[in-house]
Image: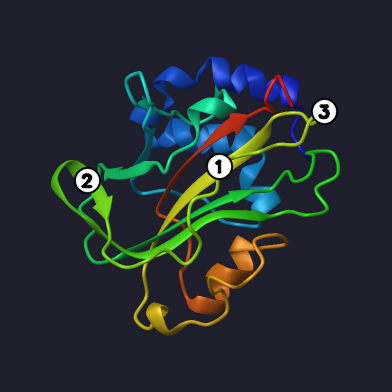
Amino acid sequence: MRPSFGFLSLVALAASAQDTSITRVKQAFNAANIPADLSIKFDPTALLEVTFPQANARPITIHAGQQLPRNSTAGPPSFNLINTRARGRFVVAVVDPDAPTPQDPTSAQIRHFLGGNFVKGNGGLLSNSTPAISNFLQPTPPAGSDAHRYIFLVFNQPNGFNGQTEVTPATPISLFNISAFAQDVGLGNPIAGTFMLVAPDPTA
């Protein structure tokens, strides 16, 4: 069952402390019904910080369940993986399971970002030197929709990932299935994640 977005607003109000605790992030995911809606097992072992640059203000680092105005999400965001000793390469995915509306998600999932070959640097900052499979797409919920959930997930990158052809830059971004993709290319379960809520532009 999809969560009440009135209830999700309560999650957002409590979000300011959530990304300091893996347990609280997991609780926020469960409260928002994300594992069920994505058909994933979410038992994170690290924290993911997602930060959006702002044109004339300080960058915004989101907390699990936080609602942001759309004009704060142009991005592209940066990713920090913290509280982990994990090494190697990572895959980052961003999906919207609520398109075109949470009540009728017939286009879901929308793939808002997919990239591999991320490595962890100083402070946990993830960076890569290869093009993304899907470049970051700013959230754009349609007029009249409730807020959408935008879910950020990090996976350990398996050997051979760079040779996968299931999703390429030419693959449509709609009707994506992150759990099926993860299974098909051997990503396993996500090791970290967070999410935000974004409503349509008031002028839309």
* Crowd around label 1: few <14 · some 14–19 · many ≥20 (10 Å): some
Q: In the figure, residue 197 lies in which quadrant? A: top right
* Helix, strand or loop under label 3: loop
Q: Amino acid at mark 2?
A: Gly
- The residue to which callout 3 is attached is 144
Query: Whole-percent x and y of residue 38?
Result: 65, 53
- Nearest to the observer: residue 113 or residue 97: 113
Describe residue 54's horizontal placement relative to residue 87 as left or right: right
Looking at marks 2 and 1 on the same chain, the residue that comes earlier in the sequence is marked by 2
Looking at marks 3 and 2 on the same chain, the residue that comes earlier in the sequence is marked by 2
Can residue 66 be seen from the camera position used here?
no
Describe residue 146's horizontal placement relative to residue 28 as left or right: right
Q: Amino acid at mark 3?
A: Gly
Q: In the figure, residue 83 lies in which quadrant? A: top left
The answer to whether mark 3 and mark 2 are in CB contact below 8 A is no
Looking at marks 1 and 3 on the same chain, the residue that comes earlier in the sequence is marked by 1
* Helix, strand or loop under label 2: helix
* Crowd around label 3: few <14 · some 14–19 · many ≥20 (10 Å): few
- The residue to which callout 2 is attached is 124
Give the answer, above or below, for where 197 lies relative to 137.
Answer: above
- The residue to which callout 1 is attached is 138
At 78% from the left and 44% from the top, the residue drawn is: 100
